[in-house]
């Protein structure tokens, strides 16, 4: 058995603002590694532990250089780490059809959700909204769609109450097992539950998922052709992308991308999302899949919401 774990930051307990990553580095990294450690403890305590051959962890926040390779290796010698950027399929880099299940940890609500700590989507400073076939997509369902293209189910999502509202209450992924890390009060405020309870909830959830029939877990599948819609915050970004063949301008800030290969889910928009999200650096450029047209430096975006 192979398990894939994608680890983001904004949905973790103990964090309410991107500034904590810079100003409270020690506590930030402790919180990040604690979240991973509890997942690993759940795997080790599960009845399927003996069947697990590999645990791949994708460091999926910002530059992808937040997790300690040494510390992860001490947690479990089956762990491999995906680190750095840019990279294909950014938050789910190296995920393929050989994996049995995926876990998403530290995930957060998409943009516009009320009472959602650090709500945003990919390129939060540049992109207002992503859509596939007209449907609103947050980072969780976007990555779940990429996983589904490999027939890999997302068995567990760990994140804030705002994301739970989107996935469960608003039925974006109502079937997924969810562990709530914090009650989001506003965009930059939250109430954290006792750490002991969060650890216990995480371990129990991991054990429950691994005890289930993984082959029958639902997939977040999209229809083909999967048309990618992007609503930018700046008309300049849309101007640059609209020059690319295959891109249709919908409005001042909105574009729609239909891939040349209309029969393949992975190439039909999802690869475009992967390329877009992979370039989380200060020299923001339109992905090569969208022709490589450079974007003005003043519109460069960081990874923070």
Image (spheres, grey):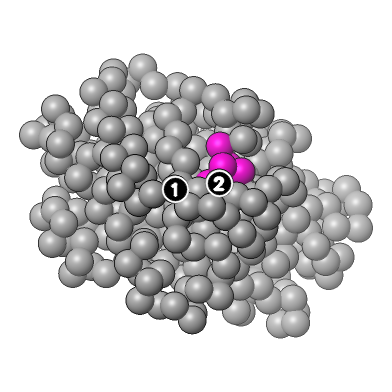
* Image position, residue 39 (x, y; %): 28, 45
CB atoms of marks 1 and 2 within 8 Å: yes
Q: Could you tell me which residue is drawn at 49 percent across and 63 percent down?
A: 15
Number of other residues with Cα within 10 Å of mark 1, as a class: few under 14, some 14 to 19, many 20 or more: some
Q: Could you tell me which residue is drawn at 44 percent across and 55 percent down?
A: 13
Q: Could you tell me which residue is drawn at 75 percent across and 35 percent down?
A: 134
Toward which corner of the image does residue 162 lie, by quadrant? top right
Position of the N terminus, as image quadrant, is top left
Identify whether 292 is placed above or below 193. below
- Magenta span covers which residues? 160-164
Chief secondary structure of the magenta portion: helix
Identify whether 50 is placed above or below 233. above
Please tell me the numbered disc located at residue 183.
2
Residue named by callout 1: 193
Pick the front one: 43 or 63: 43
Tell me if 93 is positioned left or right of 212 in this view: right
């Amino acid at each position: 058995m192979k398990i894939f774990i994608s680890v983001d930051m904004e949905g973790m307990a103990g964090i309410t603002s991107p500034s904590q990553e810079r100003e409270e580095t020690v506590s930030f990294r402790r919180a990040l590694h604690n979240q991973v450690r509890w997942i690993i403890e759940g795997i080790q305590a599960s009845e399927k532990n003996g069947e697990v051959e590999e645990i791949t962890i994708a460091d999926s926040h910002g530059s992808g250089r937040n997790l300690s390779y040494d510390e992860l290796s001490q947690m479990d010698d089956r762990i491999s780490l995906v680190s750095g950027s840019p990279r294909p399929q950014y938050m789910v880099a190296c995920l393929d059809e050989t994996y049995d299940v995926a876990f998403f940890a530290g995930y957060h609500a998409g943009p516009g959700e009320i009472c959602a700590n650090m709500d945003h989507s990919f390129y939060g400073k540049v992109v207002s909204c992503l859509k596939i076939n007209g449907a609103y997509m947050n980072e969780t369902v976007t990555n779940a769609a990429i996983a589904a293209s490999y027939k890999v189910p997302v068995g567990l999502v760990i994140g804030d109450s705002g994301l739970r509202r989107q996935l469960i209450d608003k039925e974006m992924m109502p079937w997924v097992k969810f562990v709530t890390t914090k009650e989001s009060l506003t965009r930059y405020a939250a109430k954290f539950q006792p750490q002991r309870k969060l650890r216990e909830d995480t371990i129990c959830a991991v054990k429950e998922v691994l005890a289930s029939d993984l082959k029958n877990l639902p997939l977040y599948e999209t229809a083909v052709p999967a048309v990618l819609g992007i609503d930018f915050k700046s008309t300049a970004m849309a101007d640059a992308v609209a020059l690319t063949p295959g891109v249709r301008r919908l409005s001042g800030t909105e574009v729609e991308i239909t891939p040349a290969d209309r029969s393949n889910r992975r190439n039909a928009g999802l690869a475009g999302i992967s390329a877009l999200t992979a370039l989380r650096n200060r020299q923001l450029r339109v992905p090569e899949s969208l022709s490589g047209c450079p974007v003005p430096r003043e519109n460069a975006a960081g990874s923070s919401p």
